[in-house]
Image (spheres, coloured by chain):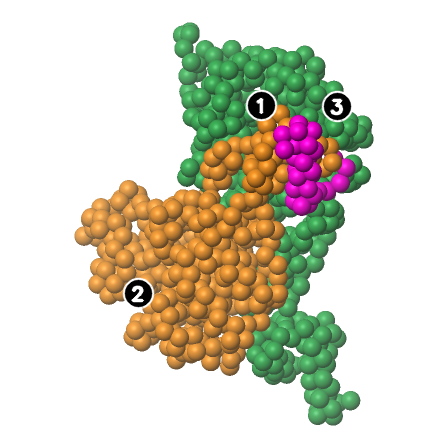
Chain colours: A green, B orange
Amino acid sequence: MCGGCNGGAEANGSATNGTNGSVQHPVQNRSASSPYQSVGDYLSNVGKFKIIESTLREGEQFANAFFDTETKVKIAKALDSFGVDFIELTSPVASEQSFKDCKTICGLGLKAKILTHVRCNMEDAKAAVATGVDGVDLVIGTSSFLREFSHGKSMAYIQKTAIEVIEYLKGEGVQVRFSSEDSFRSDLVDLLSLYKAVDTAGVQRVGIADTVFNSGGATPRMVYDLVRTLRGVVHCDIETHFHDDTGCAVANAHAALEAGATHIDTSVLGIGERNGITPLGAFMARMVVTSPDYVKSKYNLKELKALETLVADAVQINIPFNNPVTGFCAFTHKAGIHAKAILNNPSTYEIINPEDFGLNRYVSISSRITGWNAVKSRVDQLGLKMSDEQVKEVTAKIKQLADIRPLAIDDTDSILRSFHAEQVEGSGTY
Amino acid sequence: MCGGCNGGAEANGSATNGTNGSVQHPVQNRSASSPYQSVGDYLSNVGKFKIIESTLREGEQFANAFFDTETKVKIAKALDSFGVDFIELTSPVASEQSFKDCKTICGLGLKAKILTHVRCNMEDAKAAVATGVDGVDLVIGTSSFLREFSHGKSMAYIQKTAIEVIEYLKGEGVQVRFSSEDSFRSDLVDLLSLYKAVDTAGVQRVGIADTVFNSGGATPRMVYDLVRTLRGVVHCDIETHFHDDTGCAVANAHAALEAGATHIDTSVLGIGERNGITPLGAFMARMVVTSPDYVKSKYNLKELKALETLVADAVQINIPFNNPVTGFCAFTHKAGIHAKAILNNPSTYEIINPEDFGLNRYVSISSRITGWNAVKSRVDQLGLKMSDEQVKEVTAKIKQLADIRPLAIDDTDSILRSFHAEQVEGSGTY
């Protein structure tokens, strides 16, 4: 057996399997003597992923966020009830109150594991342990940009520090994640070497983040390629963290899972630095389509709206009109051609069933682009009896009025009722 | 030369090249005798795409939308000034006013080509031509769902009707796009056969849409695969239309371009049925990262904010807090570790330069997660002189106060000024 680069991977494999008790992936079971990792290590996790919910860490970096202890506790309990796997908290060294809040939340006895996110140095690591968290998320900037402009430390120094901190944390019996902050601009060889080393040292997870993206921007294809490569190099779990500057954070999370990532960072409504990260709700919308059974059995989707409302109120924002699932129009249908089909079979125009989230669909008929099938459905709802010809006639009337001014649902109902009354009187059937 | 399926593609190639003057793609130049299309037809259009802006069609299907003529004209002019290639309007058969508005906008003399979107039948096509549009976007539902529940017509009938309508429109000298409404749930062979037939008939574009997605939901990977397949089958341009129910509409548009699509449908703020389609602004954010030169030279990015405000006001919505580029916090930096790096080199934490959009970055220092580098920058902005030690001291003070209550920027400035005044008095240097 040669002592080249593959030797490291083998040592790595046994060290990891022996010490940290992480989930056994197919990658860990491949023959240690095979130099080819490209088939055996393939693993899509779209049907089996974990959520690291970072509203109380990344979310605290949102411009509007100020969470007092009471609010933090409320949010933590709501996240736990929703069913997230991990709750990540602001570093205890950020401020005195941050330290106290970490301790408080660790003491709540939640089902979710509590993590805190600290810089990769011994002082921060010790403060984290002192709060009683289940796991520590170490982060360090590794890209040439960050090396030059932020902490100016060499890769060798980064690696040495990282191993020391990891050894300390392992000794304290807490889970460890090691993450580079700017994975997509880091030198690939540097990044893989570092991750291989920390994997060998026994971390539970490595994390990659596109806090900035690389100079071309991280697209799902780029995410897939990097995660797929990393999946062939480390044996531990892979956590991913995507910012939404270019609107790809949900798709990037999905691509990461396709490539074998195991954990996705989210925050409620995506709140975080700048315009935030993968939103929990939009991610649920994506994944309930990809893996309905897993998502519906594991997460309490009906609590999503209340959870989002809680956080939106806490940071004084409105839920975006176009928010997946809970945006006010997410299940509103308007065009006649759409409404006709959806009234026959909702799945024609809905990939998500609003009832899974405890919500309802709404077919709007108060516009010039409505159609007679939609109007007929409303006529039936109102208990009015009309022939198809009559419905077509009143539809033309609605479209004519809606051409002139916006109609509210009440307006349209009045039109239907008065038309019906006229018809009934006219026909003398009463 | 055999008369099999490849014969059709060859005839198709010459018909298309000869008659409709569409852009010459590599796909059209490959050897007609090669049975393999998989190399020569590869074409990524991420650096050369066109926008079909559908705020005045898809956007009119948004729950809140009621556009009177004046508003439509304002929006059309603003879109034209922004630089979109095509403006798509609601079908003239939707209502009498819709017909008049089509004529009005066609008469404005805009640089953008004017399209209208109608059902694939002769009556609608004639109404479209009568408005004076440059092109007609034909749409028909083809998936088994839509066939069963919406119009109930067979594929053969669909194809026959389509060809008749296309021939009519060609005779009238207008551009034609043919689109299936629910491409991702249609039978692949049905869809490709139909598209090959309309390509041979000489349409300028075929369109695919995930109005509903297929039962698994359209992800970027699925989009890439379908567009890539279609690229090998038709010679004409390919337009794509993505809904945002699962938050993937921007990434799907990008994946479509990577696979060889040529045109992307957008609407301002994504307004449309349910929670809408690929938003123009988020798509610009994505593409200015992927293809900065093309995007910056072609579109007037500095007009984005005004354009979004115009449409938001017209449909009475707020611009989402997390909207790419124009969300209120898109360029706000808060955490100390971020702020330190960004003050040294903005591209460390910004993939998009706010100045390209006529906007500014903002480093927030009014929180407990701020850091002394960020505070130092504000001290300098305020023209106060402090040593690094003094800045660290006042930073601790800010963090302590921010632990207790939310701080506004004014609060922080006051703290800095009064601390400075104390120091100056204390040191007696004044």
Q: Are marks 3 and 2 in contact (CB under 8 Å)?
A: no
Looking at the picture, which amino acid does disc 3 mark? Thr
Tell me the subunit letter for badge 3. A
Using the image, tell me which numbered label, if any, was put on residue B126: none
Q: CA distance from mark 3 to mark 2?
A: 71 Å
Quarter holding residue B236? bottom left
Q: How many marks?
A: 3
Tell me the subunit letter for badge 1. A
Name the residue rendered at 39%, 49% in the picture.
B257
Residue at numbered disc 3: A131
In reply to whether residue B423 is colored magenta, the answer given is yes
Residue at numbered disc 2: B201
Q: Which residues are magenta?
A: B403-430
Q: Can you see residue A243?
A: yes
Residue A336 in percent (x, y) is at 57, 70
Looking at the picture, which amino acid does disc 1 mark? Phe
Name the residue rendered at 57%, 79% in the picture.
A403
Q: Tell me the mark number nearer the camera, choosing from 3 and 2.
A: 3
Q: Secondary structure at mark 3?
A: helix
Name the residue rendered at 28%, 60% in the picture.
B22
First in residue order: circle 1 vs circle 3: 3
User: Do circles 1 and 3 both sit on a common chain?
Assistant: yes
Using the image, tell me which numbered label, if any, was put on residue A178: 1
Residue B350 in percent (x, y) is at 49, 40
**Observer-nearest residue: A100 or A388?**
A100
Looking at the picture, which amino acid does disc 2 mark? Ala
Tell me the subunit letter for badge 2. B
Q: Can you see residue A57?
A: no
